[in-house]
Image (cartoon, grey):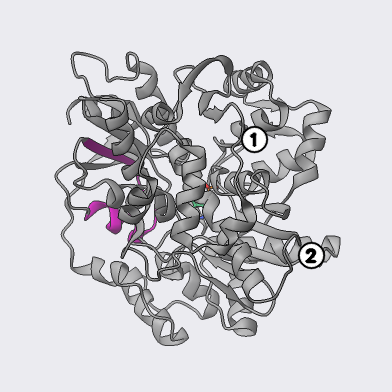
Amino acid sequence: MRYHSTRNGKNFVDSAHAVLTGLALDGGLYVPEKLPQIDVAGCLQENTMEMATGIIGAFLPEIPNMKKLVDRAYKGKFQTEELTPTVDTGKFTVLELFRGPTSAFKDVALCMLPQLLTAAREVKGMNEDVLILTATSGDTGKAALAGFANVPGVKICVFYPDGGVSAIQRAQMVTQEGNNVAVCAVKGNFDDAQTGVKNIFAAGENGRLPGGNRLCLSTANSINIGRLAPQVTYYFKAYADLLRRGQIQMGDTVNFCVPTGNFGDILAGWLAKKLGLPVGKLICASNANNVLTDFIQTGTYDRRRPLHKTLSPSMDILVSSNLERLLYFLSEDTELVSKLMNQLNTDGNYTVPANLKAAIIEEFHAGFCDDVGAQTAIANVFKEHNYLCDTHTATAWAVAENYVNQTGDSRPMVVLSTASAYKFPGSVLSALEPLSDNDEFAQMDRLAKLTGWPIPRNLSDLQTKKELHTDVIEKEAMLQFVMSL
Ligand SMILES: *Cc1c(COP(=O)(O)O)cnc(C)c1O
């Protein structure tokens, strides 16, 4: 399948190349020339692993033995064989994406990406090692480290904003074992770390680190198509669950509300719709960093605003990279996308043409909810539905509620749940009762006692693990750090 950059439709690569390099050399994101087709009715009959095999294979046909890769990626690593279960709360259906090895939704993609990457390396007969560079706002880092640890032919280096992730998230990363992993804090926020990674790519030569070092650069951020494709699967899985429970008939449309940061998760939902899944509205939920809410409502994207630190840090983002793909898909105009992205770079804002704005509003709705609203939702959902949400999920729940109240849209609503409540124990616990302890591990225990919800093993084990990665650097020193690996 031919892929090209969102900023240039003339140079083509295949899907294996797109997975290997992550980002196109012109700074654009890889998109398929034509979206694949699948047998939707057949797919909905399958179990999650079979769905994943068919869907990922449809996007990445140059990567062989997909069934084997899917097995290796997921078998025995999730709490349940169905990988991403759904829970009918009586009001909304919650799609639980956090039942993987690091209790974050990013596991769905990042268990799969190393398999795709090593397979792509083989397809391309590549001898050099690949260096995965990743900036994280908290969850990607650990999920990527866990996915890539000890994978032959690959090294991984994760940068996180110093003080910008929770104590649990930090503990998850700095205790990561493996002979090919590096973790480093950067003085700055997530956007600084992400910009630093982009600068390292820009300093490279032909996709390789500068200087004689021949490491081939790639990324585990959600700009990699190898991360996006596996996320399409769980939209099908959720729809199949609603069918099985008799809550919908085949063909009925279902709305999805997605807690959004880099726009990867929700874009996967849009791709599921383009593959033929009966998806109604895709509701983009943001926290106080409501740049996407403003964009979807007005057609103007403006990143010139302060970045707020919120209780849902994985959504504390001002530049949502994957939005670029949506702009391309809906306009099919690489010149336009290139122009808008340049404007974002130089002016900090852009406005899309009226027809593109209309196309976006046709398929998306956007809303936001601040920390107070999210904590209120945590308390209410627990009280009324006996369901324990984390802060990101609660943000989406609140936005979904507002959407239903505003529009009266009565179609079934699936709320994507992107993290275990135990990844943010202080924020969740303080929604339910006043905090009596500042230690996050003590808060975890208290939360478990109060709610009766079990703590995932990977999180309760952290307390006894040794800190292995304690570097903190200036953002200007990121390239130097990488060169020294
Ligand atoms: C990454 C993340 C998100 C945002 O997902 P995007 O694909 O970046 O939009 C939401 N919630 C949690 C817990 C996350 O880790």
- What is the total number of numbered labels drawn onto the structure image? 2
Type of amino acid at the residue the image marks with label 1: Leu
Residue mark closest to the camera, 1 vs 2: 1
Work out whether 330 lies above or below 9: below
Residue 170 part of the magenta segment: yes
What x and y, as percent, mark residue 355? 82, 29
- Of residues 396 and 26, the one nearer the viewer is 26
Residue 399 appears in which quarter of the rendering?
bottom right
- Of residues 174 and 106, the one nearer the viewer is 106
273 with respect to 107 (left or right): right
Residue 322 appears in which quarter of the rendering?
top right
Work out whether 198 lies above or below 132: above
Q: Is residue 138 visible?
A: no
Q: Is residue 271 visible?
A: yes
For the residue carrying disc 1, how many other residues have a C-alpha within 10 Å: few (<14), some (14-19), or many (20+)?
Answer: many
Secondary-structure class at tag 2: helix
The residue identified by callout 1 is 326
Q: Are marks 1 and 2 in contact (CB under 8 Å)?
A: no
Q: Residue at x 46, y 37 (%)?
A: 60
What's the magenta region? 154-175
411 with respect to 446 (left or right): right
Secondary-structure class at tag 1: helix
Checking the image for residue 404, the label placed there is: 2
Q: Is mark 2 within 8 Å of ligand 1?
A: no
What x and y, as percent, mark residue 134? 36, 38
Type of amino acid at the residue the image marks with label 2: Val
Mark 1 and mark 2: span between their CA atoms? 24 Å
For the residue carrying disc 2, how many other residues have a C-alpha within 10 Å: few (<14), some (14-19), or many (20+)?
Answer: few
What x and y, as percent, mark residue 253? 75, 59
- Of residues 424 and 455, the one nearer the viewer is 455
